[in-house]
Image: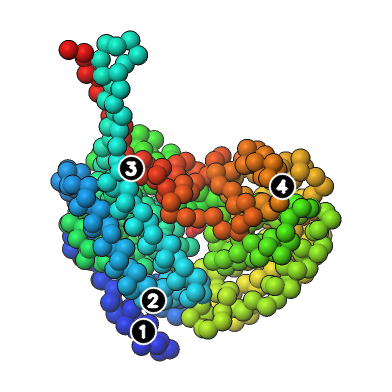
Amino acid sequence: MSTNTTTRTSLETKVLGRLPDGLLVDGSWRPAADGSTFTVSDPATGQPLARVADAGASDGVAAVDAAARAADRWADTAPRERAEILRRAYELIMAQREEFALLITMEMGKSLEESRSEVTYGAEFLRWFSEEAVRISGRYGTSPEGSGTILVSHRPVGPCFLITPWNFPLAMATRKVAPALAAGCTVVLKPAESTPLTTQLFASVLLEAGVPAGVLNVLTSSRAAELSGPIIQHPELRKLSFTGSTPVGRQLLAQAAPQVLRTSMELGGNAPFLVFDDADVDSAVEGAMRAKFRNIGQACTAANRFLVHADLADDFAERMAERVRSLRIGRGTEPGVTIGPLIDRKALASNTALVQDAVAGGATVLTGGRALDQPGTFFEPTVLTDVPSTARLLDEEIFGPVAAIVPFADEESAIEIANRSEYGLAAYAYTQDLSRAHRLVRRLAVGMIGLNSGVLSNAAAPFGGVKHSGLGREGGAEGIHEYLETVYAFVASA
Ligand code: ADP
């Protein structure tokens, strides 16, 4: 692994120096079959951080072969043994929280404080699913006509292919790997091209915690499509779990169809953030800041449209703009920085285009609105009002620090506007009216709702969406069932 050491602190150098070199296949780290590598860069500086192995098709096949060979033995381990391994991994990550946080910030860009929160959140999936591993239970009952006994049990689905995105490099991996291993599945994990380093460190922790050879295979790659095709077609693969954009999710679903793979899809979102006239506005502004600017707006649960009661809209927008003006932009490792860079130039161009489109349609920029003219991919945190209903950013996922504020007249129209999206991942609502809160839970076409809260992710809760936001749930008691088959046996009465 070659690294650029020009402006690095000693901890940064130490963390990069600890990373394993190569692809993890069948328990050992090895180069890509064709020797390819690619460079991982710091989005805040554009400087290279490391070179990593670049897996291709034959590496993919080898990894599924290894996962398939390890499958039966891993499925037969005692649940307690799997639980203990996951629990050890949780402890190991928490003991190295600072190293993980720094690595996340270096390759992804968010502030160190946010990276620390991600480490805590991400590690929690290991602890949660270590606890769930020993609680996989079935059903036992007499058939209604009394002819026999119905026995329902669960067994692991088998080898899984897990594809993760770059926005939460640790948590998106733990959220898939932990339930899969807890259920008794073996896995092939492919991190995003821009953030493979955190996954490498995570994998080395899992090995240290006792995950046997072949149970976890990790393929870093810049050739996602070339690598994934043969993996998905592999006759031994049983499951595909993907987190990423809806267009790629659709492609993967089509690719999974011939093999009739079990699939979990965590795709895009277009979360409405509703502020009713009975809301506690101070707390709504606080929640809005978190729902919008956490992770530099690069979360599928990020608030995409702020729907605010017409009586409050101007005041709310001004208060939000005031808060936004005090955010500090910079490299996430610098003290006090709250807004790091966007992940890459494509993201910068897309945020710029979305704001320009809204402004061309009549939107007013209260603050921000532009890319910074400096190295790195920084976009100013932005608040827009007078946003025309035709603006693309009301339909499309922004994935950046841009808040669009749209007034509404009453509850009925707020719900109608909120549901006007092909997506249905998350929604947020601020209201003091309990009956209204219950109506919103019933009527908003989403998988998750934050009530008087700008954050909702929790390892103990089922994360996932409806409509084009995906299939399946991650986390909670539901999460492990994504990796379990249901088996029914009928036992004739004696
Ligand atoms: P984003 O636009 O947020 O980068 P993507 O959906 O492109 O989201 O990427 C999410 C993950 O999916 C990444 O690991 C990426 O490498 C992977 N990916 C992208 N395209 C494909 C593809 N055609 N086949 C398999 N994986 C893909």
The amino acid at mark 4 is Asp
Nearer to me, 410 or 371: 410
Residue at 72 percent across and 41 percent down: it is: 416
Between the residue at mark 3 and the residue at mark 1, the CA separation in whole angstroms equals 37 Å
Position of residue 130 relative to residue 482, above or below, is: below
Q: Which residue is mark 3?
A: 483
Residue at 47 percent across and 68 percent down: it is: 117
The amino acid at mark 3 is Tyr
Asked if disc 4 and disc 2 are in contact, CB closer than 8 Å, the reply is no
Examine the image and state in which quarter residue 116 appears: bottom left
> Helix or strand or loop: what does disc 1 sit on?
helix
Q: Which mark is residue 98?
A: 2
Q: Which residue is mark 4?
A: 433
Between the residue at mark 4 and the residue at mark 2, the CA separation in whole angstroms equals 41 Å
The picture places residue 21, in percent across and down from the top left corner, at: 25, 71
Asked if disc 3 and disc 1 are in contact, CB closer than 8 Å, the reply is no
- Dot 4 or dot 2: first in sequence order is 2
Q: Which residue is mark 1?
A: 11
